[in-house]
Image: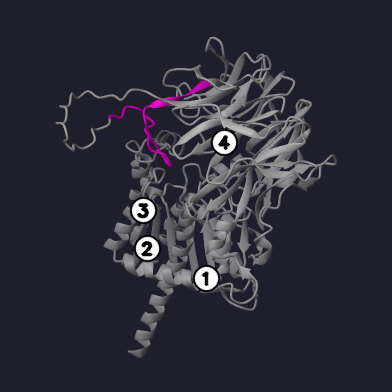
């Protein structure tokens, strides 16, 4: 299909969707995406009476995500902005006495440390840094701010090039690459250098560098109680063992590093208890699996024998925060497609479930996400469900969730959303129980016949759940019954379930998806001649695998896929991880395994009209993967199209216009295929 025809189709589709609201209350509209807001990264004040959070939104003029800092009272009506429009602010942190707030604010190309004096309401930039700082943390006495910042190293060149004549317009000189990690999705080709630890006087001044060399020191930082040291995580052998990080104590005066952990596997996100006696962190023993369950660990801050908490929980822990009295920790883990806020005592014991609606910060498809913080005897966290993105909530004295914000009260009550319903089915492969959700179109009528859209999550070690998702709601608003499934390999069902696809992906996850489709069809309201399928990343892998193994779908959209595991493993940005953990051997040692699992090898069986869509700046699943499948389909004269998204990385929906483009081009492709089929049938009938 020519690009001009597809663009014209998209334009017509947008005109059509603009009229969805003409008759009564509207379903979600494409431009409504720019009206949505969500809360993220709460930081509770030391007295527990207020919380600063990032109020997130989409800027319709600049086509980007905005992050503004807002102050919300806990137990009061206080709710006010701390930063103005047009800037992006984050990494907020309270001083220990609660009298100052520090954060990182980006204005144009510069990101600097800002401080607000809470009594006067005045704020100012206190740094003049060459690169953007991250992970701000106050020292216990409030005199220093620690952070990490990228430090470049001199460029390497072995060639002695002649100097360009004065006024000449020569091309930019070549750049030499020697590092294992030299490019990253969302960042492109990386400058040579590493992130290092700095301290900055809290009253402003010059930052002092504490670490040096080629090792990256970044991520969560924690001060020891005496203010003499910092706790941090770093990997000293990232080139040969990409997951093997340890927790270190960094002496602020001398820069001496002392390892506090020692095992094969990641140890990260150190957090010190309020009384300064205990250190908690996240990590696991590396068994060279594609997916491990991350555990919660604890030991005395001065050193000692690590002890695992919540060791009877067969789920991966993604976040934690100490309670006020250092008696235990709040934690976050995934369970059957939902993010759960729990609590475990420091001495051990079972995890107590506090709230099963944690999260709500993934704006796009129904992924997880969210954050929490605890201070002053209060835990504040992001809370969302299938009908709304994340708001702020806290637990009252009885342990009940209480809302602090209602950021979408101005739009979502005036939109009719598709109802999200849970389903379970036994897989035809082996009877394994598989969970899924169905989004029904607004005003759903079970007596009608609807087209079905199977939407497949990426990862593949990730999960969907009953979460608000603009993309699935937009599909439902256009009349599709949307089915999304957590096939084997998904997270939140335990480590064994997640690793059922170890060295076998794609495989029986295909059967899980087809069984879920068949179960919905059996409910009687699906038009079996109008089945469609799409998915991104790992979902793109499975979509391209599906069209090579069945012709039951009317049309398919393959987003940012892997088509050839050999080319992917040697062009993806995270190639040291993928080759080590996703495959039994290197591609030149066992090419058959790579090819047997490559959708490219089944392109000869594809008859389904297929569109591919990938960001031109995708370094996770490079656009060359999609191009291989497109060119193979073209050589076979299968109806196909390739949509390139300029400037987009693997996270296509990071920019709202790209999110809408992916949804609307997908719908447009399905309608174009159906229109062509109808026209061909009419010609045949007339003939």
Instruction: State which quarter of the image contains the C terminus.
Output: bottom left
How far is the residue under mark 2 from the one under mark 4? 35 Å
Point out the tag, 1 or 2, that comes first from the N-terminus.
1
How far is the residue under mark 1 from the one under mark 2? 35 Å
Disc sitting over residue 18 in the figure: 1
**In the image, residue 617 lies in the stretch drawn in magenta:** no
The residue sitting at 47% across, 46% down in the picture is 504
Circle 1 residues within 10 Å: few <14, some 14–19, many ≥20:
few
- SS at mark 4? loop
Residue 179 place in picture, x, y as percent: 35, 27
Point out the tag, 4 or 1, that comes first from the N-terminus.
1
Residue 414 figure quarter: bottom right
Report the mark closest to the observer, 3 or 1: 1
Which residue, given by chain and number where applicable, does mark 2 sit on?
A: 606
Name the one closer to the observer, 514 or 130.
130
Report the mark closest to the observer, 1 or 2: 1
How far is the residue under mark 3 from the one under mark 1? 31 Å
Which residue, given by chain and number where applicable, does mark 4 sit on?
A: 292
* Above-or-below relation of 221 to 602: above
Q: Is residue 452 visible?
A: yes
Is 388 on the left-hand or right-hand side of 63? Answer: right
Circle 4 residues within 10 Å: few <14, some 14–19, many ≥20:
many
Which residue, given by chain and number where applicable, does mark 3 sit on?
A: 626
Point out the tag, 3 or 4, that comes first from the N-terminus.
4
Point out the tag, 3 or 1, that comes first from the N-terminus.
1
- SS at mark 2? loop
Residue range of the region highlighted in magenta in the rendering: 176-198
């Amino acid at each position: 299909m020519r690009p001009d025809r597809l663009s014209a189709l998209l334009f017509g589709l947008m005109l059509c969707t603009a009229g969805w609201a003409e008759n009564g209350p509207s379903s979600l509209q494409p431009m409504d995406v720019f009206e949505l807001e969500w809360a993220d990264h709460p930081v509770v004040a030391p007295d527990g009476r207020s919380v600063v959070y990032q109020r997130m939104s989409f800027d319709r003029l600049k086509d980007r995500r905005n992050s503004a800092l807002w102050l919300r009272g806990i137990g009061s009506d206080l709710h006010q902005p701390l930063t103005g429009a047009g800037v992006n602010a984050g990494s907020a942190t309270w001083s220990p006495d609660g009298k100052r707030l520090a954060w990182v604010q980006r204005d144009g190309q510069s990101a600097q440390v800002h401080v607000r004096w809470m009594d006067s309401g005045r704020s100012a930039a206190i740094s003049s840094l060459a690169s953007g700082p991250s992970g701000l943390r106050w020292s216990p006495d409030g005199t220093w701010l620690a952070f990490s910042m990228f430090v470049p190293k001199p460029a390497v060149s072995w060639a002695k090039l002649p100097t360009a004549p004065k006024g000449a317009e020569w091309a930019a000189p070549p750049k030499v690459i020697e590092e294992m990690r030299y490019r990253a999705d969302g960042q492109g080709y990386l400058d040579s250098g590493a992130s290092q630890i700095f301290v900055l006087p809290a009253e402003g001044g010059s930052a002092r560098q504490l670490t040096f060399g080629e090792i990256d020191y970044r991520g969560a930082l924690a001060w020891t109680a005496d203010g003499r040291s910092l706790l941090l995580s770093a990997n000293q052998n990232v080139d040969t063992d990409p997951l093997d990080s340890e927790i270190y104590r960094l002496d602020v005066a001398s820069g001496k590093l002392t390892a506090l952990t020692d095992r094969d596997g990641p140890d990260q996100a150190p957090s010190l208890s309020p009384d300064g006696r205990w250190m908690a962190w996240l990590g696991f023993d590396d068994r060279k699996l594609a997916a491990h369950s991350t555990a919660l660990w604890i030991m005395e801050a001065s050193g000692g024998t690590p002890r695992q908490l919540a060791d009877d929980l067969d789920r991966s822990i993604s976040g934690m925060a100490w309670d006020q009295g250092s008696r235990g920790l709040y934690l976050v883990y995934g369970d059957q497609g939902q993010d759960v806020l729990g609590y475990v005592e420091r001495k051990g014991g079972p995890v107590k479930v506090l709230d099963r609606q944690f999260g709500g910060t993934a704006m796009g498809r129904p992924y997880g996400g969210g954050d929490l913080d605890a201070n002053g005897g209060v835990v504040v966290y992001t809370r969302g469900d299938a009908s709304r993105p994340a708001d702020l909530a806290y637990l009252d004295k009885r342990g009940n969730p209480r809302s602090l914000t209602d950021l979408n009260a101005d739009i979502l009550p005036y939109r009719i959303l598709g109802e999200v319903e849970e389903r379970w089915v036994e897989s035809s492969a082996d009877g394994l129980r598989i969970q899924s959700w169905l989004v029904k179109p607004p005003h759903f009528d079970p007596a009608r016949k609807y087209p079905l859209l199977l939407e497949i999550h990426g990862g593949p070690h990730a999960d969907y759940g009953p979460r608000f998702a603009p993309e699935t709601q937009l599909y439902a608003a256009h009349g599709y019954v949307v089915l999304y499934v957590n096939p084997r390999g998904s997270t939140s069902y335990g480590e064994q379930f997640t690793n059922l696809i170890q060295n076998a992906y794609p495989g029986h996850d295909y059967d899980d998806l087809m069984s879920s489709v068949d179960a919905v069809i059996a409910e009687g309201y699906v038009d079996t001649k109008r089945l469609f399928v799409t998915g991104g990343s790992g979902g793109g892998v499975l979509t391209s695998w599906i069209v090579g193994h069945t012709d039951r779908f009317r049309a398919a959209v393959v987003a940012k896929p892997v088509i050839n595991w050999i080319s992917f493993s040697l062009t993806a940005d995270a190639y040291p991880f993928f080759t080590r953990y996703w495959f039994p051997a290197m591609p030149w040692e066992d090419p058959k395994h790579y090819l047997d699992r490559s959708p490219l090898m089944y392109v000869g069986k594809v008859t389904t009209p297929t569109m591919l869509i990938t960001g031109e700046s995708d370094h996770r699943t490079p656009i060359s993967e999609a191009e291989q499948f497109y060119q193979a389909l073209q050589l076979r004269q299968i109806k196909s199209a390739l949509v390139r998204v300029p400037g987009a990385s693997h996270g296509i929906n990071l920019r709202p216009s790209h999110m809408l483009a992916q949804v609307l081009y997908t719908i447009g492709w399905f309608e174009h295929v159906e229109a062509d089929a109808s026209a061909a049938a009419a010609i045949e009938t007339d003939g």
